[in-house]
């Protein structure tokens, strides 16, 4: 990739997020992280993790409504390095009632606490929020356009909350001028 130097695979991390629109109008988001070792990993206090085995294989599932509110959470650990790890799954129930939006990461840390949860599951929640936003975006856009074709008059500005958040969607950029000229600056 970066030249002709020989290299050896030592670790593979796979993050998978899947979103499902339910018939009752709710959303299920399933997120999984798997860390597969490419070499043996020795420990002082436990058996090693062998090449081809998982150091981590865990997931967290969310039930979310159209108002960005978390209605239910389920966390599971299929493989974890320490015996204490599975007990961390209980703390994620504290996220029920939380709304995805500004300050989401801070609120997660406040509700879970760094020593009550699992760093890997907590990191995965950011991807859950992103997956929910991507999955539900077409529905949110259709609802707003049905109300009014002009985005300046949309009652739910969250449909275009991504504007100004990256290079492609900068406020004075070409993408915004083409997609939503009403919102473009200049």
Image: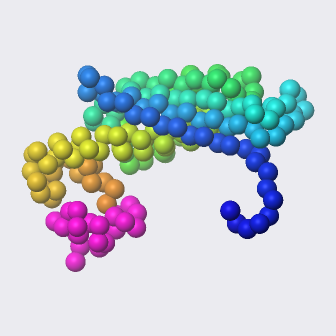
- Colouring used for the render: rainbow
| Residue 58 falls within the magenta-colored stretch | no
Residue in the picture at 38% in, 61% down: 165
Q: Quadrant of residue 79?
A: top right
Q: Residue at x 26, y 44 (%)?
A: 138
The rendered magenta stretch, by its main secondary structure, is classed as loop
170 shown above or below 154: below
Start-end of magenta stretch: 164-186
Q: Is residue 34 left or right of residue 66?
A: right
> In the rendered image, which quarter contains the C terminus?
bottom left
Report if residue 142 is visible in the image.
Answer: yes
Number of numbered discs overlaid on the protein picture: 0
> Is residue 93 visible to the viewer in this orientation of the structure?
no
Which residue corresponds to the image point at 86% horizontal and 26% vertical from the top-left?
47
The residue sitting at the bottom extreme is: 186
Residue 88 % position (x, y): 62, 26
Position in image of residue 179 (x %, y %): 23, 62
Task: Find residue 99 and report its horizontal and vertical position in percent.
Answer: 36, 37
Q: Nearer the viewer, residue 12 or 164?
A: 12
Q: Is 47 positioned to the left or the right of 120 in the image?
A: right
Residue at 26% of width from left, 49% of height from top?
159
**Up-down relation of residue 18 to residue 2 (above or below):** above
**If the image is split into quadrants, where does the N terminus sit?**
bottom right
- Which quadrant of the structure image shows residue 175? bottom left
Most distant residue in the right direction? 44
Residue 140 place in picture, x, y as percent:
23, 43
Out of 41 and 162, give the one closest to the viewer: 41
């Amino acid at each position: 990739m970066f030249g002709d130097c020989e290299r050896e695979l030592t670790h593979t991390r796979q993050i998978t997020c899947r979103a499902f629109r339910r018939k009752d109008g709710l959303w299920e988001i399933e997120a999984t992280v798997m860390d597969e070792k490419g070499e043996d990993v020795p420990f002082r206090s436990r058996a090693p993790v062998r090449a081809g085995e998982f150091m981590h294989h865990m997931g967290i599932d969310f039930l979310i409504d159209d108002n960005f509110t978390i209605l239910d959470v389920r966390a599971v650990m299929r493989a974890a390095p320490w015996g204490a790890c599975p007990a961390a799954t209980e703390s994620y129930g504290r996220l029920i009632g939380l709304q995805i939006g500004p300050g989401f990461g801070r609120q997660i840390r406040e509700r879970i606490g760094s020593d009550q949860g699992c760093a890997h599951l907590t990191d995965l929640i950011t991807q859950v929020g992103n997956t929910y936003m991507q999955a539900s975006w077409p529905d949110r856009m259709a609802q707003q356009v049905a109300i009014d074709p002009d985005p300046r008059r949309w009652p739910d500005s969250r449909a275009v909350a991504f504007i100004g958040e990256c290079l492609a969607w900068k406020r004075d950029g070409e993408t915004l001028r083409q997609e939503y000229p009403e919102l473009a600056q200049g």
